[in-house]
Amino acid sequence: MFEVVYYSMTGNTRKVADAIGAELGVTARGIKSVDKLGTDATVFLGTGCYTGVVPKEIGDFIERTQLKGRKIAVFYTSGFGIAKEREAFLKYLQNRGVEVIGTYNCFGKFAAVRMGHPNTAELEAARQFARSLTTGSSSTANKPKPAVTVKKAK
Ligand SMILES: Cc1cc2nc3c(=O)[nH]c(=O)nc-3n(C[C@H](O)[C@H](O)[C@H](O)COP(=O)(O)O)c2cc1C
């Protein structure tokens, strides 16, 4: 069983969440509407990047759904794709006792920047990310472009 949950202010992360949900056969849900997660579920949690600060809603969600001690996959979208944003998100989760089993990030449109993102290739790469974590597939048929990084935690 899978759970795909996201925080998305302007809709980009939601598109990625929907792609991952479609791949896994579940409906992606905004975190504000989620109070409980299946105890055996593999959770995919996504957010946008907002001035490099992880939204408070994510912290509330982690507490409310008792994510501490669980292994989850994370994804996020950002306007600039700077690695330190991913590191900040991972650190944030680590500090709250959440173990990350894989990460995916891609661009999201921001004002007049990154128009069209996440694009078709990025959404397909997100689906591949979900597949790779749930089936162990290492297919490179849709290898992400440089703007996209898929990183599996050790
Ligand atoms: C208030 C705000 C602040 C943002 N700050 C950053 C930032 O510091 N770095 C960055 O790369 N992108 C930044 N962005 C761009 C977003 O990360 C990008 O548009 C992302 O895809 C938004 O996700 P969402 O559509 O799911 O909300 C910002 C966007 C907003 C709305």
Image: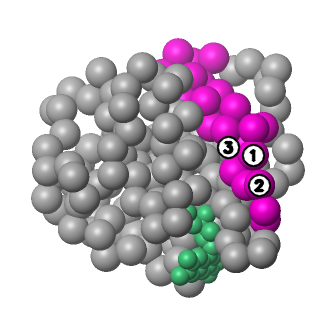
The quadrant in which the C terminus is found is top right
Q: Which one is closest to the eye, mark 3 or mark 2?
A: 2
Q: Position of residue 134 (x, y in %)?
A: 48, 22
Q: Classify 47 as above or below 59.
A: above
The quadrant in which the N terminus is found is top left
User: Would you say the magenta stretch is mainly helix, strand or loop?
Assistant: helix
Q: Which residue is mark 1?
A: 119
Q: Which SS class for mark 1?
A: loop
Label disc, if present, on residue 150 of the rendered structure:
3
Looking at numbered disc 1 in the image, what kind of residue is underneath it?
A: Asn
Lower sequence index among marks 3 and 1: 1
Q: CA distance from mark 3 to mark 1?
A: 16 Å
**In the rendered view, does 39 fall on the left or right side of 138?**
left
User: Which quadrant holds residue 96?
Assistant: bottom left
Q: CA distance from mark 2 to mark 1?
A: 6 Å
Task: Please name the residue shown 17% across and 62% down the image.
Answer: 63
Residue 117 located within the stretch drawn in magenta = yes
Q: Which residue is mark 2?
A: 116
Q: Is residue 42 visible?
A: no
Q: Is residue 61 visible?
A: yes
Lower sequence index among marks 3 and 2: 2
Q: Please rate how many residues cluster around mark 1, counting C-alpha atoms within 10 Å: few if below 14, some from 14 to 19, many from 20.
A: some
Task: Please name the residue shown 19% across and 39% down the image.
Answer: 37
